[in-house]
Structure formats: structure tokens, C-alpha cells
Image: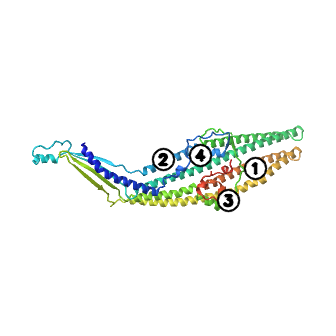
Amino acid sequence: MDFTVLLAVCRLFVPVAAFVLAFGCTSAAMAQDTFSGISPARDLDHNFAQTLPEEKRDLTLREAVFLTLHRNPELAAFAREMRALEGATLQAGLLPNPELSLNVENIGNVQPLTGDINSQKSVAQEVVQQISTIRIYQLIELGGKRAARVSAASLGEALAGQDYEVRRVEFIARVANVFTEVLAAQERLRFAEESQQLAQRVVNAVAKRVKAGKVPPIEETRATVALSTTRIELEQAKRDLAVARKQLALLWGNASPHFSKALGNLESSVTLPPFEALAERILASPMALRAMKNIEQRKALLEVEQTRRIPNLTVQAGVVHHALLGGNTAVAAVILPLPLFDRNQGNIQQAHQRVDKAVDEQAATGLRLRTELTQAYEALSAAQRETGILRDEIIPAAKSAFEVINKGYELGRFGFLEVLDAQRTLFQNQILYVRALANYQRLVNEIERLIAAPIDVALSGVVNPSAINSHNANAALRSGL
């Protein structure tokens, strides 16, 4: 191509490029007005590649939660999604690329005119001469489209961050519940061992009385059968503990648990705050904040659709080169669609309905959270009374009754059936107490999952959502297990 043609193109394109760049700067400034440039997802700790401590033999709940949050693949997938949406926000703020067009007509007719240039032959040759046209097109978005896209994309990032927080709190509560099952299984195993020891004491006492001729040998057989039953219960308790330990280790990706014991106090209790104090904390939970952020994103998407009603402007500039005459002609054009029929009405209507849907979903989320809190609160109050009765009244009475009856049997004051009944009653109430304690801790975990904070935060009067979210939502973490 002739150098003069390229030079003419460059001279013509400079003012057009300057205009495009100026518009791009204006659009970026508009984007800064609607987007802070800092995504909430960047403030979250989702670096799963960092070095983690090994699973210890004596495992605390804090360590179990830490391992799960950093090694669970589901949470890692949420973190990857947040990183992907950062790219979507970057892409939303980019300017459209210019387009270059080269058009050649009457290819090959480049011979210079000879003879009389006014002759009919020369005129015909000039008419069909080769003409080369170079054009550059630049799409200019009008109506704040780019700023609206950036705002919507950034809110999509924030929404993904809230999704991550919701899943994070759910995983903390799940770890706390499974950890509670391990603690309960350890207690059941301890009670099963104690029950076997008590049954062995009864067998020894019966054997002495049979040897002394005070009771028939059939009672020793019955005592042996009762001892065998406690052995079966002990084996069942060992299996339940093994299953609970595997379920806990699977949360951070270990098929075989490396820890040997879970450290924690199953009898730890909390001071139950007023219901309204807990209900206020729901408004700052990740689930409630996600519903609010969803409304914001839907409104931003509505704004994107509204900006699309305004057509975009296409600026065209170029140069035409005449091969025979050797002259260059500058050309320029502006293309603007006429919004006579398609004014994006359907998409705007759809976006309006999406906003209304998000508002309804927020109301439904608030109602669901309050309903779940009400159920958990009432159940926790009942569980608190149940564990108190078992701990303060039933268990001490059952232990005392067994000791008295067992001692009386050795002295011949009670029969063997009364000893077996007292032993069975003590063991059943101990297991019932462990189940009640585990249910109590699960209800505490459920409330703390709903408010995404320890229950004592509601008593302390903390109202800052960021301060609430900085806590781990489970009772054992609160008590430092």
C-alpha cells in the first residue's frame, strides 16, 4: 500500500482516537462514582494454599474448624468463584476495540493514463480505476452503559462474597455439630465402660453369695448374661465413636482420622439472652446480608438494562486512494441506530420483576430466619431445663439407688432382680443425659449459625456486623475448647 495512504489514515485517525480516549476517561470516572473499586471478597481469607498445622492427636474444636475452613474443597470452590468474578468486573470496565476495514475496488486497474486524457477511452479507464479505501470504526457507548456494567459486576462480586460467608458459617456449625457427636460418643463409651465395671462387680458379688450357698446358681448365670449385655453395649459405643471420628475427619478431607481424642466439655452451658436480642442479630447475619445484597445487584442489573435503551454511537473515519490519479480523499461518518421499535422494553420489564422478586425473597428469608430462631430458642430453653433435671436430680438419685441396692444385696436385703433394675436404670439415665447434652449443644450451634456469632455477643450489645462476623459461630469456640 502507498505510504501516502497510510500517512493520510494516521492523520485522520488521530483526532478520532483522541476523542475515543477522552470518552473512555469520562466513562471510567463515571464507573468510579458507582463502584468503590474494593470488592468485599478481597477482604476474606480464602487462601487455601497456605501451610497448615498437622492434625493433632488431641484435637480441639478450634483446630477442627480451622482445618475444615482451609481444606474443604467445597469452600475452595466458592473462593475460586469469587476470583473468577473479579475477572468479570475487570472485563465489564474495558472499552470496546476499534475495527479496521480495507476495501479495494477494480483491482488491477493501476496503469497511468496516456495520450489525450479527455478522450473517451481515458475517461472510461479513469472511471474503472482501482480505488482503495481504509476505514477505522470505533463504537462509543452512550448513556453510562460501562459504569452500569461495572457497578453490576462489582455487586456480583459482593454477592459471591456473601455466599461464601453463608457457606463458611454453615460449615462452622456443621463441624461443631459433628464435633459434639464425637464428644457424646466418647462419653457414651465412658459410661459403657463404667457400666461393664459395675456389672462385673455385681457378678463378683453374686459369685460370692452363690459360693456361700445364700442364693441359687441361677442368679450367677443371670449376672453373667447381664455382663455380656454390657459388653455388647461397649462394642456398639466403640463403633459409634469410630463412625463419628471418621465423619469429622472427612470434613477436612481425611478418610482416616489421625486424632485419637476430641477435647471439649460437653456440659458447657450458655446464658440464654432475650429472644429479641437474638432476633436483632439476625439482621446482621450473612444470610440476611446476602438477601439485601441481592436486591442491590438486581437494581444494578435493572440500571444496565435501562442504559441499553440509549443507542450507541459508531464513529467512522478513513481515506480513499485513487490509483490512476494518485489523489487521496478523506471520508468520515457517524452511525446512530434509531430506537423506533426495539427500546429494550422486554429486558427492562424482566429486570423490574427480578427486583421485585429479590425484595420478596428478602422478606421470605427474614421470616424463615426468625421462624427457625423461634423454634431453636424454645427447644433450647426446654433442653436447658431437661439437662438441669437430669444432672441435678435423676443421675444423682440413680447412682445413690444403685449403690444402696448393691450394698443391700451383698447383705441379703435386696434381690438380684432389684440390683439388675437399678444398674439398668443408672446406665439408661446416663445415656439419656449424654443425648440431652448433645442436643443442647446442637441447639446452641443452630442459634449461633442463625446469628453468625456466639450467643454471648447478643448479651454484650455488639451491633457492628463486621464485629459479629469476626467471631466463629459455635459454642465450643466461644468457650475456647
Report the residue at 51% width, 45% height from top: 80
At mark 2, the secondary structure is helix
Q: Earlier in the sequence, mark 4 or mark 3?
A: 4
> Which residue extends farthest bottom?
276
Q: What residue is pinned by disc 3?
A: 273
Q: Amino acid at mark 4?
A: Leu
At mark 3, the secondary structure is loop
Report the residue at 51% width, 61% height from top: 359
Single out the mark in the foreground, 1 or 2. Answer: 2
* Mark 1 to mark 2 CA distance (whole Å): 54 Å
Q: Earlier in the sequence, mark 1 or mark 3?
A: 3
Determine which of the numbered discs, if any, sits on residue 57 in the image.
none
Is disc 4 in contact with disc 3, using a CB cutoff of under 8 Å? Answer: no
Q: Earlier in the sequence, mark 4 or mark 1?
A: 4
Please tell me which residue lies in front, 101 or 423: 101
In which quarter of the view is residue 59 placed? top right
* Mark 4 to mark 1 CA distance (whole Å): 37 Å
Report the residue at 31% width, 50% height from top: 14
Please tell me which residue lies in front, 356 or 473: 473
Say left or right for 171 vs 404.
left
Is disc 1 in contact with disc 2, using a CB cutoff of under 8 Å? Answer: no
Q: What residue is pinned by disc 2?
A: 84
Q: What residue is pinned by disc 1?
A: 429
Residues packed near mark 1 inside 10 Å, few (<14), some (14 to 19) or many (20 plus): some
Q: Earlier in the sequence, mark 2 or mark 4?
A: 4
At mark 4, the secondary structure is helix
Q: Earlier in the sequence, mark 3 or mark 2?
A: 2
Please tell me which residue lies in front, 267 or 422: 267
Say left or right for 55 vs 434.
left
Is disc 2 in contact with disc 4, using a CB cutoff of under 8 Å? Answer: no
Q: Amino acid at mark 2?
A: Ala
